[in-house]
Amino acid sequence: MVGLGAILPGISGGTLCASFGMYRPIIDVLSHFRNGMKKHWRMLGIFFIGVFIGFVGLSGFAAWLLKRSTVPVTCVFIGLILGTLPSLWRDAGQKGRCRRNVLELLFCFAAMLLLLLLFERHFSITVVPGIPGYFLCGLLWGLSFIIPGLSSSSLLLFFGLYQPMLEGISSFDLTVLLPMGLGLLACVLPLSKVIGLFYQRHYAAMSHGVIGILLATTVMILPPVEGGLAANAANLLCLLGGGAASFAFTRLSEKLSESKS
């Protein structure tokens, strides 16, 4: 779901990672590789196999979905994000919660919302597809995983790289995949150490800030209410279905974790 969702414009891979409880383990591994791998290697191994299948194997399917039913698919992913909020809220308060943390959540929500609105209205640059352009794609993918709420696909649409990148991924073109991989590593490795350090020293502030960013991104990808009653009802069902599914899976995951401990 993270791999497929990260391809869709407007949806952030980092947001989905945070929603599904994968953000902290990834940051732990990238910032402290040896200790992080000892703790999370099984979970992350299976997770990244799924990401690869969703990102590379389903990129053609994502392109087809975008042409046929963009709004219902977006509603499903909005539901998936919203359904995980209760779990994220509980996790953010693990080490205590005070009024300042709530203010930090609201500040991050407002700042991210303002940033996304300004970017959407005033930013448009076209980049010629090629090795430098696909290296930029990798940098933006890395940013979207490290900074929850930042949608790399939306940025790539602004740069004019989204469609050629999607075609290159679906055809497994190494002239697209290799520069993207290098750009991804060049972005993720240094930034993850900084984020990991902030989590160690300011866990509550970081966790509540991520929730604020996640909520701002969700607001920005809400589709407009238009069309007939049947279409809007179908979109609402997609949203509720996604929310119910992710809520059920997060509760199941919590129960499994409790039984193991």
Image (cartoon, helix red, strand yellow):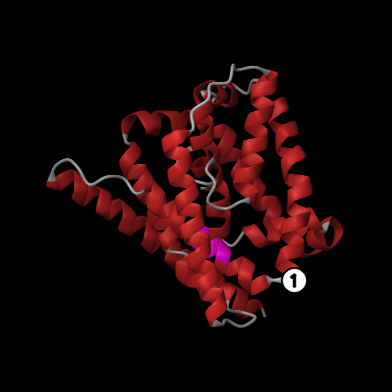
Query: Does 118 sit above or below residue 17?
Result: above
- Is residue 259 visible from the viewing direction of this image? yes
Query: Does 34 sit above or below residue 202?
Result: above
Task: Based on the picture, tell me whether residue 212 belongs to the magenta stretch.
Answer: yes
Residue 157 percent location from the top left of the image: 48, 29
Say which amino acid is labelled 1.
Arg
Relative to 42, is 108 on the left or the right? left
Query: Does 237 sit above or below residue 105?
Result: above
**184 and 106: which is toward the camera:** 106
**78 and 223: which is toward the camera:** 223
Q: Quadrant of residue 180?
A: top right
The residue sitting at 54% across, 46% down in the picture is 150
The residue sitting at 58% across, 54% down in the picture is 17
The residue at which mark 1 appears reads as 201
Q: How many marks?
A: 1
The residue sitting at 76% across, 56% down in the picture is 194
**Magenta stretch bounds:** 209-214
Q: Quadrant of residue 161?
A: top right
Residue 131 percent location from the top left of the image: 69, 19
